[in-house]
Structures are given as structure tokens and as C-alpha cells.
Image (cartoon, grey):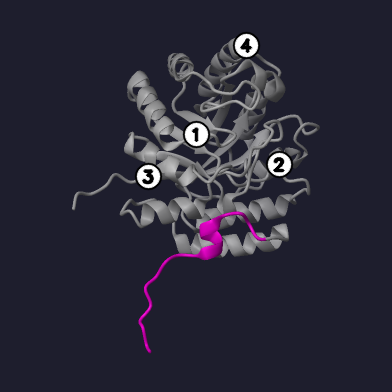
Amino acid sequence: MPTLAPVQIVEVSPRDGLQNEAGFVETADKLALVGRLIAMGAVRIEVASFVNPRRVPQMADAEAVVAGLPAAPGVRFIGLCLNERGVDRAIASLDGVRPLDEAGCVLVATDGFGIVNQGQSVADGIIANTAMLKKARAAGLFAQVTISAAFGCPYEGAVPAARIVELAARMADAGAQEIALADTIGVGVPAQVADLTGAVIAAIGDIPVRLHLHDTRGLAPANAWAGYQAGCRTFDSALGGLGGCPFAPGAAGNVGTEELLYLFGHSGIATGLALDQALAANRWFAGIMGRALPSRAGKAGDFTVTENTK
């Protein structure tokens, strides 16, 4: 049997998993979550978003979270940045004991969602992200960009694939070191994900492509598999399937990390993360949140064959 290429999982639960939660999750609990993610093998973790706390109150402690990050050799921490001010805040962490490693920029693929989410059109977003990527790279941060609403927009509906390919090419030319395609509201289907992922990979050459999938309609694991078959090797996920966007009506949680570990692990594809530890972290964090988390694999657990002792 041929060896299948491994994948990398980018854990986004401390940021995207929590940003839509109504009740504030304490800084200490966010840092404890980061510690659990590291223990289960996560090597890239999106820890905070540098946004206006009046718009996203859950991220009001971004600097405190970054300041409290543990020493973790081999682990890369990501701060999400929606504008140049956000990049400046990420750069400021470089003076701390444990600085960030990456600035995650965001380009929305439609005017309708872009204006609601970031107060800018697509054209404005191209200009802004070009400057953001340049500034982040100059400061020594790994500069990556997510194209949001790449598979459908909550305000404008279907988004032409050609537009996403063009935006990816523009961001590659602007210096993006990785480009993520985000199914922000979970409307994509496997054929669409495979086609668009393949087209973007072909358009941007050696720059890695990442998929950020939401599980609104239960298709995120299937979409991840389609993306893998199309050549994607890096996937965002959130422990417990938490998440949602405050500015995207109808958006549900991210694909659960447990789902991806089950999917890829039982398909013979290495992830570097341990499903049993992810399940334990799920149970622990459910206690912090005061409710069961959405992930179906998190609830069902792993599949093991037990001896029939009848």
C-alpha cells in the first residue's frame, strides 16, 4: 500500500472557536486550552484576534493571551489581523517573552461581506492586505492570508471560482507565504472544494494552500477529504467543532479537530495529533464551557474493535 502524504492541522479553537461565544472565556482558561492543544500534538495554533473589542468582546484579552503563551519549542502561534492596526499589535508581541510567529491576514471575497466584516470592499481589501503582508514580513512574522467566503457569501450568494483564483494570485504576488480558502458559512460541497482547491494550487505554484472549513451543513469532513485529494495538505479545525462568525448569519462551527483526526487517522494519513488526547481535551473543555461540544466524533469517540466474549 502506498504511503499517503501527511497533513498538518492548524488548531483555531482559541480564536475562531471562541470568538462567537456570548459568555466571556477567561484568559486563564484560554491559556489552559492552548496547553491542552500542545499536549495533544498541535504545532500551529491560532491563539487570538487583534480586533476591536467592542465588535468582538471575546478577543478583548488578545495581548494578555499572547503574553501568557508557554515556551513550546516547535509550536507556532498565530494572531489574526483584520487591518494594519492588527498587524501592528501582532508585531508588538515580538518584544515579549513568547512572541507570535505568524500574522494571519484576511481578505473577504465579496463587497457585501467585506463591508460588514471589515468595513472594506474587495478592492480596498486587496490594497490593505498588500500593505499588511509587507509589514508583517518586514517584522519577521510569517505572513499568510485567508480568503474568506471563498465558497459562498451570506450576503451575495454564490461566489465565482475565477474570482477566488484571481484573489489568490493577487495575494501570492503581494507576498503571502500561505493562502487559505475559507468556507466561512459552510455552503461548499466536495466537488466544488476539489475544483477550487485544485485551481488555486495550479495558479499559485509553490505557495501552500490551506483549507478552513465550517460544518454548517455537515459536509466539512467530506470537503476536507475532497481538498486532500485535490492536493491540499493543511487544514484548520477547532477542538469540539466550536466556532462561528459574528458577522456571517447562519454560520456554524468549524470542522471539529476530532472529526479530522478520525477521518485522516483511519485513512492511513498521519496528522501528528493524538485522537485520544483530543477526546480528553474535548471532555475537559466541555466542563469549562458548561455544555457538550458540537463535534460528533468528540461525542462518539474513536472506533475500536472489542473482543466478543459471549
Q: Would you say the residues marked 2 and 4 are in contact, meaning their CB atoms lie under 8 Å apart?
A: no
| Upstream in sequence: badge 3 or badge 1 | 3
Characterize the local packing of mark 2: few (<14), some (14-19) or many (20 or more) Cα atoms within 10 angstroms.
Answer: many
Q: Residues within 10 Å of mark 1 (few under 14, many from 20)?
A: many
Residue 47, percent across and down? Answer: 61, 42
- Which residue: 54% across, 34% down? 187
Mark closer to the chain start, 2 or 3: 3
The residue pinned by badge 2 equals: 20
Q: Under tag 1, what secondary structure?
A: loop
Indicate whether residue 296 is drawn in magenta: yes
Compared to 134, does 54 lie above or below? Answer: below
List x then y, in percent, for residue 195.
38, 28
Q: Which residue carries the number 4 mark?
A: 124
Distance Cα–Cα, label 1 vs label 4: 26 Å
Cα–Cα span, label 2 and label 3? 27 Å
Residue at the extreme left of the image, as rendered: 1
Say whether residue 280 is magenta.
no
| Alpha carbons under labels 3 and 1: distance apart | 21 Å
- Decide whether the magenta segment is chiefly helix, strand or loop: loop
Say which quarter of the image contains residue 29: bottom right
**Crowd rating for badge 3 (residues with CA inside 10 Å; few <14, some 14–19, many 20+):** some
**Residue 50 x %, y %:** 68, 32
Of badges 2 and 3, nearer the viewer stands 2
Q: For residue 7, which numbered disc appears in the image?
A: 3
On the image, numbered disc 1 is attached to which residue?
Answer: 188
Pointer 3 and pointer 4: residues touching (CB < 8 Å)? no
Q: Which residues are magenta?
A: 292-310
